[in-house]
Image (spheres, rainbow, N blue to C red):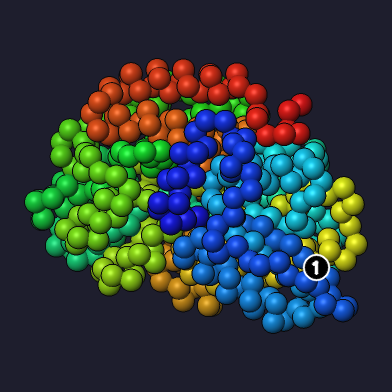
Amino acid sequence: MQPPLLSRRRALAGGAGALAAAGALGSLSGCAAPATAAGPGQTLLRYWHLFGGGDGVNMQGMLDDFRAGHPEIALEASTLQWGAPYYTKLGMAGAGGRAPELAALHLARLAGFAPGRLLDPFDLGLLAEHGVHEEDFPPDIWRRGQAGGKQYAVPLDTHPFVLYYQTEVCEKAGLMAGGGLKPISGAEEFADALRAAKKATGQPGLVTETLGPDCITPWRLFSSLYAQTGGTVLSADGKRLALDDAKALRVLEYLARLIEEGLMVRRVDYPGSVGVFNGGKTAFHLNGEWEISTFKATGLPFSMTRIPALFGTAATQADCHAFVLPHQKDRGGAPNEAAHTLVAWMLKHSVAWAEGGHVPAYLPVLDDPSYLALKPQSEYRGVIDDVALDEPAWFAGSASRMWIELGAVFSGVLTGSRSPRNALAEAKTRLRALLDTRNPLPGAAT
């Protein structure tokens, strides 16, 4: 999910330090829903989420449809400020046992929420009554929602790093075939494609965010390509540094070479990168799939595909939006059943959610004719099996300190202010510091 840019930047800036800033604890965005009173015979269901911008419009439409079909449930949906303020407020609510019945959470942040303390487990029997089962999800993504043999998160989607391409520019550069991008295999073939694009337009062939306050795209770019080498940043349990120097340097040196050869725009912030691609002369753009609405709105002739396998496997960095049950002292009864009802309904109706670019995690939807008709959204649906989530650590996942700190480090490689070796050394220093830092969320410490 990519919220409105300015709000995302402010939220991330606030999250770079300690999470428990007093002003952040109660911050709600201006579009938070008013309090809903349950009428006679109704069950009150409170749902917190962090979806703004186009995501927020899609979510609101889905919730309105749910309300229309479930008059017995009084659904109170609140949109909270994206990023660290959201997660701080959610953690405080769970620690006090006074949380809403349901909330959204980035799956890679689950480890930081001390399942069993700040979160309650799902009742798989209740989900099964609504036709939702474990086998309806990619195994790896489903397992990431587990802790201690219980299911604490149910994934709604995955939102991967993808490759946008301008069809007219790529056609001019000889990179198209059969209405789509020709297959690209390996780092050198991708560099050759960028050279062909530059020759056709006189402009660098690739643009992505390389700098700016709390710039995270350099981390997502590194993480995607590093995952393709088979390397991991942390150990499987998220408690030890596992960065492979040789594999990391291979990726960083390749990125530095693209910059030095003029195949990639060197200095550009997030809105600038979107603007450059929208300008119509740059063949490729690397970003999250959420900008699909931006480029459709401008009429840009573009399509999207998964990031090619440049370094071995076809992995790409991603996170997943998921549903969680914040801890309540007296969870159960009709409100808890209503939460499970909403989760199952949202999964089964996630074609509407996919319109914003996200890949549904509920596998039956991937074969739904309505989803297959979404173009280019359905073109990269195969990425669901190859997403690389951060290893489980409290400081990882969307809007996390790791993304912000390593984004700043790898930004230097892309702008030329750091050598690949210097960036690798600094990244390891920062990761060790994070590993030695205690999770600041209340109730999360073991």
Tag 1: Cα neighbours inside 10 Å, few (<14), some, or many (≥20)?
A: many
Confirm whether residue 418 shows in the render.
yes
Between 156 and 7, the one nearer to me in the picture: 7
Residue shown at the point (80%, 68%) measured from the top left: 44
Q: Which residue is labeled 1 in the image?
A: 44
**282 sits left or right of 320 in the view:** left
Q: Amino acid at mark 1?
A: Leu
State whether residue 34 is above or below residue 114.
below
Residue shown at the point (76%, 51%) measured from the top left: 99
Between 432 and 185, the one nearer to me in the picture: 432
Expressed as whole percent of the image width and height from the top left, the position of residue 308 reads 36, 48
Between 76 and 322, the one nearer to me in the picture: 76
Residue shown at the point (31%, 38%) measured from the top left: 211
Q: Quadrant of the C terminus?
A: top right
- Assign a secondary structure to mark 1: strand
State whether residue 216 is above or below residue 2.
above
Could you say which quadrant of the image residue 346 lies in?
A: bottom right
In the current view of this chain or complex, which residue is farthest to the front? 23
Confirm whether residue 392 shows in the render.
no
Could you say which quadrant of the image residue 226 lies in?
A: top left
Expressed as whole percent of the image width and height from the top left, the position of residue 402 reads 50, 32
